[in-house]
Amino acid sequence: MGKNSIGSTISYFFLGEYFSDALRTTITVVLPIILFFYLGNPEAAKGIGVGALLISLTDLPDNRLNKLKTALSSIIVFFATTLVVSSVLDYVYLTAVVVVIAAFSFSMFAVYGQKLSLIGTMALIVCTFVMGLHPERPLYFSGYILVGGVWYYVISLIQILLRPYRSLHHAIFECLMSSAMFLNAKAKNYDVDVPLDLQQKEAIKLHIKVNQKHELIRNLLLTDKYAMNPDNPKGQLLLERARLLIDLYEQLNAVHYDYALVRKTLATGPSLKLIATLIELLAKELEQLGRHVRSAKAYKGEVATNIEYYQKRVMLLQEMECLNETQRKIVLKVVSNMNDIVRIIEMIRGNERTPEKHLQELSGSISYPLFVTGDRFSIREHLTLKSPIFRFSLRLAICFLFGFLLIWQLEPSKYSYWLFLTLVIVARPKFSITWKRNLQRLKGSLGGVAVGLIIIYFVKSPAVLLSFSVIFLLGFYAFNRLNYTISVLFITPAVILTLGSYQGHFDHIVHDRIIFTVLGCVIAIFATYLFPIWDSRQLKAKISKATKDSLHYLQVAIERKENLGENIPRMARKNANLSLSALSEAIESASQEPMRKHIDFNGLYGVQSTIYQINAIITSIYLSLNHKPEQADPLLVKQIISNLSNEDALENDDVPHVDAIDVDHDDHSTKQKLAHIAALSLEFNRFSAGFRG
């Protein structure tokens, strides 16, 4: 990364959504604390400050209506939780019973979706803070928590009313930046110095990342009734941008070759280098476009249409005169693909609508609610040990019970609640995530303690120490959604400096912070073996789902487009991408589980890679203007279905010869693409052999 790139990244961070949100949240939290301490009411200062601090962590990017629902739910749950827990604090055993029940109940909120799951987690953190603060007047303190929650969300809702599409613009920016990274990875396919297997793994990771950004955009945009109103010009512009982003990614992913064969075929001459350079220039244009896309104004970029791009393009076209027919077909296909990418980039830059879609009025034929990932709302079906949510909720409740039993055996400490706080934060349903969170929290906490001790050694003024704690709080918010380790690195000294400034005994605070954090991490790790949720045991099901969705996508791609409409193909593509992402995440998770030594990860990576390549070729078939359903060879399709479904092989007389792709006859026809998929499906059959049964 060059100096200009680093500088622009830093400047974007300080001008972007993460830092501006962090600044607004920090001011919102700190302002009432300063005000009420100045007025001589420390109880109100602590209550309102804690209420605003904790409820701010439920405030994720969303549209206006959903954010209002989140605000009401959070405020009500926080107030009720604070009132109940603070009312029983004088009864030790009753407190344990109430908090253990809360641990189970709030964890079960995950049944109702991601947003309520987060509210449940934060409500459980409210329990731990109430135990630590031990308010003398429960009703008053609960009222202060209520005021803090209302105060925070009033500011947040005012912001979204003034700038309703801010988060959506940021999501589109991140999607473009991820797409640029993906395109840079594609350029490495034409660099003979980059091993293809490493490049393939990088491309799959970026494929997952881009699809996650697409999913966020769908959830922000398609659930917003105001934006989706046909009479709302800004909403329709954003809808068109989102659609163009999907089309752009299709083009980025559509052309998939046997790159080893392409490298070999174009080994002589500058063609490979020129192709890689052109793709890198387009990636640079996407980055530039991303930095301006937050504006509703048209942006006329200068990269995709600059002199260097066209010079390289002309050089590549001139080089084609020296190529043979096979080489020329490969280069022409790549050039055609880049032309499509440039066309879509130009449309996004100029805020233009797709002419074909505009003429066909496709916006009226797409049923957008279908593309929003729904949440399951049936609590009854989760009241069983077969449910991962129930298993985790039960496990966390037992962790809390064990935590109480452990604390009762230790010397009394007002900071023992940090053990429960650590449990809530690091204990996750899956072993891999719990392990990762433990490492992040330990590294962040120990680093934060070191920073806090250095500051305490050199600074003695309470006012200056509190100023540092505000700066660290800002850092915590700025990195909370970006990097958990860094966010903990910031919040730890903020806590130490704040508590030490008011209560003294810095050494006692640091000692308890380390001890109870480590104890919480140890309990969380050992508890993962209680009602465990292992991704390694889900691999077969994930592979089956991914191949099933890919086969459905293939069947849709080879059908006649006019008979299917817009919804079926788009849903098929989305499901295939999401299933591959789920499989990839499961493989990554399984690689960190205790039984990883008994898993054939080479086979898993082979399965992952072949499905990814197959989906890319299917997209190429779907986007091909020359494709007709009758071009699909039934025997090839039958063989693909047999291989990907792990069914019994076809009779030898019925199996076409697809062991290798004949580059001399690579005409990019549907039949040739199906032959390529069939060859890949044979590879899939070999890789997946150990995951059947």
Image (cartoon, grey):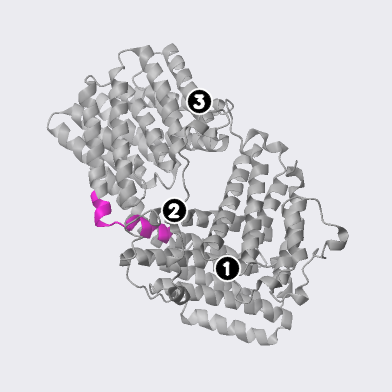
| Type of amino acid at the residue the image marks with label 1 | Asn
Q: Nearer the viewer, mark 1 or mark 3?
A: 1
Q: CA distance from mark 2 to mark 1?
A: 30 Å
Q: CA distance from mark 1 to mark 3?
A: 49 Å
| Type of amino acid at the residue the image marks with label 3 | Leu
Numbered disc 3: secondary structure: helix
Pointer 3 residue = 394
Which of the numbered marks, if any, corresponds to residue 294? none
Whether residues under marks 3 and 2 lie with C-beta atoms below 8 angstroms apart, the answer is: no
Span shown in magenta:
158-174
**Can residue 461 be spotted in the picture?**
no
Q: As drawn, is 594 to the left or to the right of 455? A: right
* Residue displayed at 45% across by 26% down: 104
Is 301 magenta? The answer is no
Q: Nearer the viewer, mark 2 or mark 1?
A: 1
Pointer 1 residue = 563
Numbered disc 1: secondary structure: helix
Whether residues under marks 2 and 1 lie with C-beta atoms below 8 angstroms apart, the answer is: no
Q: CA distance from mark 3 to mark 2?
A: 30 Å
Magenta segment main secondary structure:
helix
Q: As drawn, is 279 to the left or to the right of 414? A: right
Q: Earlier in the sequence, mark 1 or mark 3?
A: 3
Which of the numbered marks, if any, corresponds to residue 216? 2
Q: Position of residue 287 (x, y in %)?
A: 45, 66
